[in-house]
Image (cartoon, helix red, strand yellow):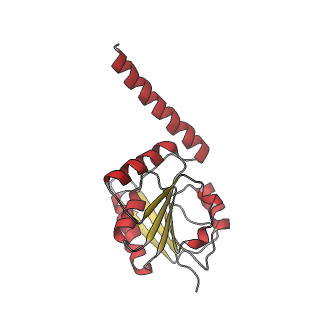
Amino acid sequence: MNVISFSFIFFLLFLVAVLLLDSMKNGITPTPSTHVERDAALKLADPLMPKRIADLGAGFGTMAFSFARRFPDSNVTAYETAYIPWCFLQLRRLLQPRPNLNIKRQNFMNENLSQYDLVFTYLYPKAMDRLEEKLDPNTTHVLSNCFALSNWKPSLIWPVASKVSYSSIYLYRKKE
C-alpha cells in the first residue's frame, strides 16, 4: 500500500471516528430531512411568516439553507455541535452564500430560544423532552420532523411518505 492510499484510509477512519464520537455525545447521528419532509415543513412555515428562525441540530443544513432561501428577509440560525456536519455547513455556506444565515457551533439548550418565532427540530425523543421544558408556547411556533413534543398538543400533524420512510411533521402554533 502506498502512502497516498494509507493517508486516505487513515483520513476516512478519522472522519468515521469523529462522527461516531459526536453521535455518542449527542445521542443521534446526523440525519438529513428528505426533500418531501423539507417541502412539507416549508409549506407549513409559509403562513407563519417567521422573522427569526432557529434550526436546532441543523446537521448538514437541509432545513437551515431552505429556510434562508424561502424567507430571505428573516434571520435564520443553525445550531450544530457535531464537528463534521458543522464543517460541512461552513463549506456549504461558502458555496451557497445566504446572508441571512448564521451558523453556530453551540448547544442550543444553552441559548435563549424565546428570541425565535419559529423553531425547527429533527431531534430524538429524549432531546425533545428536554427541549419541551425550555420552549415557551406563548412566544414560539415549533415545527418538528418525526418526533412530537410529549405534553404539547400539535395544531397540525402532516403525514409525510417517501420512498425511504414514513414520518410526520408536527406543527405547534404559539398561543396568542
Quadrant including the C terminus: bottom right
Spot occupied by residue 38 in the image (x, y as percentages of width and height): 38, 63
Examine the rendered structure and indicate whether residue 161 appears above or below residue 43. Answer: above
Q: In the rendered view, would you say 92 is above or below 35? A: above
**Nearer the observer, 99 or 29:** 99
Q: Residue at x 59, y 59 (%)?
A: 108
Residue 156, given in percent of the width and then of the height, sits at 48, 76
Could you say where residue 56 lies in the image, as x and y percent from the top left? 53, 60
Q: Nearer the viewer, residue 8 or 154?
A: 8
Farthest residue in the bottom direction?
Answer: 176
**Image-quadrant location for residue 41:** bottom left
When asked about the image quadrant of residue 97, the answer is: bottom left
Image check: 83 left or right of 35?
A: right
> In the shown orientation, is residue 131 left or right of residue 90?
right
Total marks shown come to: 0
In the image, farthest residue toward the top: 1
Q: Is residue 163 above or below residue 5?
A: below
- Is residue 164 visible to the viewer in this orientation of the structure? no
**In which quadrant of the rendered view does residue 132 lie?**
bottom right
Asked if residue 162 can be seen in this view, the reply is yes
Q: Of 167 and 113, which appears nearest the observer?
A: 113
Q: Residue at x 46, y 28 (%)?
A: 13
Identify whether 78 is placed above or below 47. above
Please report the residue visible at 39 percent of the width from the left and 54 percent of the height from the top.
165
Quarter occupied by the N terminus = top left
